[in-house]
Image (cartoon, rainbow, N blue to C red):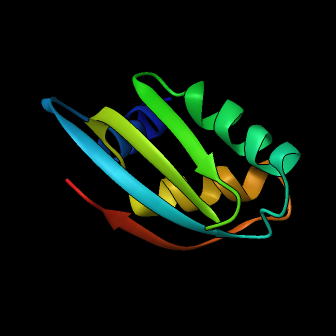
Amino acid sequence: MAGITEKLKKIFTKGSETHEYVLNVEGMKCEHCSARIVTVLNKLDGVEATADVAAKTVTLRTNIELNDEFLKETVAKVGDFVVTSVNKIK
């Protein structure tokens, strides 16, 4: 159990500032696909996600600093999607 706790501490670093990420997502072809991804990401504590199907991007706003690998793994678990890049805007 201690191993899981330590991993989560590395993934989430709480802070008072707002962080914004833009994920480029391959395989997101329709509103249904984007809704599935956004629904899962919005379940994360303090995360607000929106998607742009035409641009194949998902934008996240959060007060928690997120790990790139965690975001890639989370989106991949939703379906046949691949995050090709994670861009931290602020």
Q: Quadrant of residue 42?
A: top right
Relative placement, left or right, of 4 versus 57 is left
- Front residue of 68/19: it is 19
Residue shown at the point (87%, 44%) measured from the top left: 32
Q: Report the number of discs.
A: 0
Q: Residue furthest front?
A: 54
Q: Quadrant of residue 29?
A: bottom right
Q: In this picture, is 85 found above or below 20?
A: below
Residue shown at the point (36%, 47%) measured from the top left: 66
Residue 88 in the image: state x and y as whole percent: 29, 61
Relative placement, left or right, of 10 versus 48 is left
Residue 25 in the image: state x and y as whole percent: 64, 67
Q: In this picture, is 14 found above or below 54?
A: above
Q: Residue furthest left?
A: 16
Q: Quadrant of residue 73?
A: bottom right
Relative placement, left or right, of 59 versus 65 is right
Residue 40 in the image: state x and y as whole percent: 68, 34
Residue 50 in the image: state x and y as whole percent: 56, 40
Q: In this picture, is 61 found above or below 70?
A: above
Residue shown at the point (45%, 22%) measured from the top left: 45
Relative placement, left or right, of 78 versus 83 is right
